Image (spheres, rainbow, N blue to C red):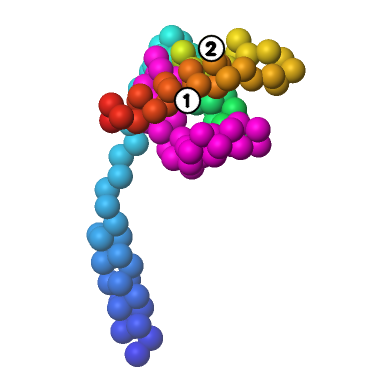
């Protein structure tokens, strides 16, 4: 009986191992420029997300009839160039948080145009 249990356990282990997918890991080198570009894209998107998360920006979007959740979804669809332009525009805003209507409308229009093109 003990031998039968040992054999069935061994057979069950072999079947389980045979059913596991054979996964191979591949690693490759990337250049420093590629790593920097990837990080810059992530930073740009994070900056835009942080900007849209501000209460004053969300209130202004709602007053203009734009759903903040929709705006965030559209920001995720921005290309690297569009995100960089929008991030630079956010950087040029006054440090005190005074957002002019023109600045806000420009940022909002870029997000809407990107959404329409998608």
Q: Quadrant of residue 28?
A: top left
Could you say whether the residue bearing mark 1 is in a helix, strand or loop? Answer: helix
Prevalent SS, magenta region: helix
- Disc 2 crowd, CA 10 A, few/some/many (<14, 14-19, 20+): some
Q: Quadrant of residue 30?
A: top left
* 21, 14: nearer the viewer: 21
The mark that comes first in sequence, 1 or 2, is 2
- Left or right: where does residue 85 sit relative to residue 19? right
Q: Residue at x 30, y 65 (%)?
A: 16
Figure label count: 2
Of the numbered discs in the image, which one, if any, rests on residue 31? none
Q: Position of residue 77 (x, y in %)?
A: 37, 30
Whether the residues at callouts 1 and 2 have beta carbons within 8 Å, the answer is: no
Q: Nearer the viewer, mark 1 or mark 2?
A: 1
Q: Quadrant of residue 117?
A: top left
* 113, 40: nearer the viewer: 113
- Left or right: where does residue 42 sit relative to residue 58? left
Q: Residue at x 64, y 20 (%)?
A: 99
Q: Position of residue 21 (x, y in %)?
A: 27, 52
Of the numbered discs in the image, which one, if any, rests on residue 88? 2
Could you say whether the residue bearing mark 2 is in a helix, strand or loop? Answer: helix
The Cα–Cα distance between marks 1 and 2, rounded to whole angstroms, is 14 Å
* 57, 20: nearer the viewer: 57
- Left or right: where does residue 111 sit relative to residue 4? right
Q: Position of residue 5 (x, y in %)?
A: 35, 83
Q: Which residue is mark 1?
A: 108
Q: What segment carries the magenta color?
A: 55-83
- Disc 1 crowd, CA 10 A, few/some/many (<14, 14-19, 20+): some
- Residue farthest toward the right in the current orientation of the protein: 96
Quadrant showing the C terminus: top left
Q: Residue at x 30, y 72 (%)?
A: 12
């Amino acid at each position: 009986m003990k031998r039968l249990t040992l054999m069935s356990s061994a057979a069950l282990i072999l079947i389980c191992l045979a059913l596991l997918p054979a996964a191979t890991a591949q690693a490759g080198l990337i250049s420093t420029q590629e790593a920097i570009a990837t990080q810059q894209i992530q930073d740009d998107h994070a900056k835009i997300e942080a900007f849209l998360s501000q209460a004053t920006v969300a209130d202004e979007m709602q007053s203009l009839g734009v759903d903040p959740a929709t705006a965030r979804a559209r920001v995720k669809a921005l290309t690297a160039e569009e995100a960089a332009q929008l991030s630079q525009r956010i950087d040029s805003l006054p440090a005190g948080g005074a957002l002019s209507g023109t600045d806000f409308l420009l940022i909002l229009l870029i997000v809407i145009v990107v959404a329409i093109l998608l």
